[in-house]
Image (cartoon, grey):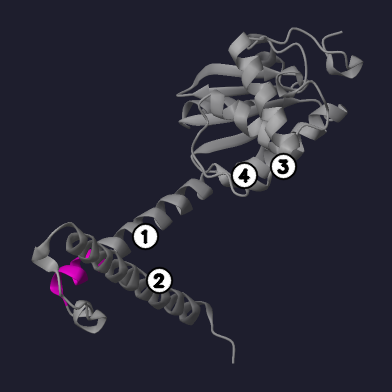
Amino acid sequence: MALDKKQLGSALTTIAHGQAMMAAVRDYAKELKENEQQGPCCQGMDINVDELLDDPELERLHRDRVAAMKQEAERRAALQQAGHGSYSEITEGEFLEVVTKTDAVVCHFFHKDFERCKIVDKHMGELAPKYMEARFIKLSAPDSPFFTVKLGIKVLPAVVVFKGGVSVDRLVGFEQLGGRDDFSTAALEARLAAAGIRTGVRKGAAAAGEESEEEECQVAASIRRGIVHKGSDDESSDFDD
């Protein structure tokens, strides 16, 4: 018989509590073992896990760990409620509120008919769930003339990074991503990291392959040289004409 939502939540909480307790036991046992190796005071001491489970200090550690887990889950839920963790399109009327009320924003100014903008969409969609602290959004440049002009967006695709409501960096075209349309998500991720978007853990980085490593080296070299992309060879990228 399938568990209902309440039962499932209770079961998951029980599992989490048990995992937290055992993790605390392992940490405590490891600490005792390290003390034993460092000096004679703890030598010969047998560690009984069952007795450790009844230790009041361990119970306190367990409560603290569970409370921290709960607090982190609530924080992530609040971020998701505010649009973090997903890549979404907003309107010009929403832009100012999103940028000024969010600590970090990565905004893609796009044109729905430009192929290179679709490439950026793909990579932004993959990165958004990994960087919960930042909000990943897209704004149609032709439909947002006020902010497009104010921010000097003349070539697409353009990715602008905002911190505390201030534009701190931008990526225009693909020159800083190796100058190729088939750049990897890791290359864009490295470029955003250079702009200060560092929250989140890259999964599978070791399996990215030699090609990704080469692209990241190209990105790093571009950053060191201070390249600022002024144009694009893709004739569809210039939407100002």
Residue of label 2: 16
Residue type indicated by callout 4: Ala
- Determine crowd level at label 3: few under 14, some 14-19, many 20+ residues with C-alpha closer than 10 A: few
Residue type indicated by callout 3: Gly
| Spatial separation of the CA atoms under disc 3 and disc 2 | 35 Å
Earlier-in-chain disc, 3 versus 2: 2
Q: Nearer the viewer, mark 1 or mark 3?
A: 3
Q: Nearer the viewer, mark 4 or mark 1?
A: 4
Please give the name of the residue rendered at 22% of the width and 81% of the height, measured from the top-left corner: 48
Is residue 159 shown to the viewer in this render? no
Residue of label 1: 69
- Determine crowd level at label 4: few under 14, some 14-19, many 20+ residues with C-alpha closer than 10 A: few
Earlier-in-chain disc, 4 versus 1: 1
Q: Nearer the viewer, mark 3 or mark 2?
A: 3
Residue of label 4: 205
Residue type indicated by callout 1: Met
| Spatial separation of the CA atoms under disc 4 and disc 2 | 27 Å
Residue of label 3: 209
Highlighted range, magenta: 55-62
Mark 2 falls on what kind of element? helix
Q: Marks 1 and 3: CB-CB under 8 Å?
A: no
User: In the image, residue 97 lies at what x, y percent?
Assistant: 52, 29
Residue type indicated by callout 2: Ala
Compare residues 122 and 54 and report the one nearer the observer: 54
Earlier-in-chain disc, 2 versus 1: 2
- Among the 4 quarters of the image, the one containing residue 174: top right
User: In the image, residue 126 lies at what x, y percent?
Assistant: 68, 44
User: In the image, residue 7 lies at what x, y percent?
Assistant: 47, 82
| Spatial separation of the CA atoms under disc 4 and disc 1 | 26 Å
Q: Marks 2 and 1: CB-CB under 8 Å?
A: yes
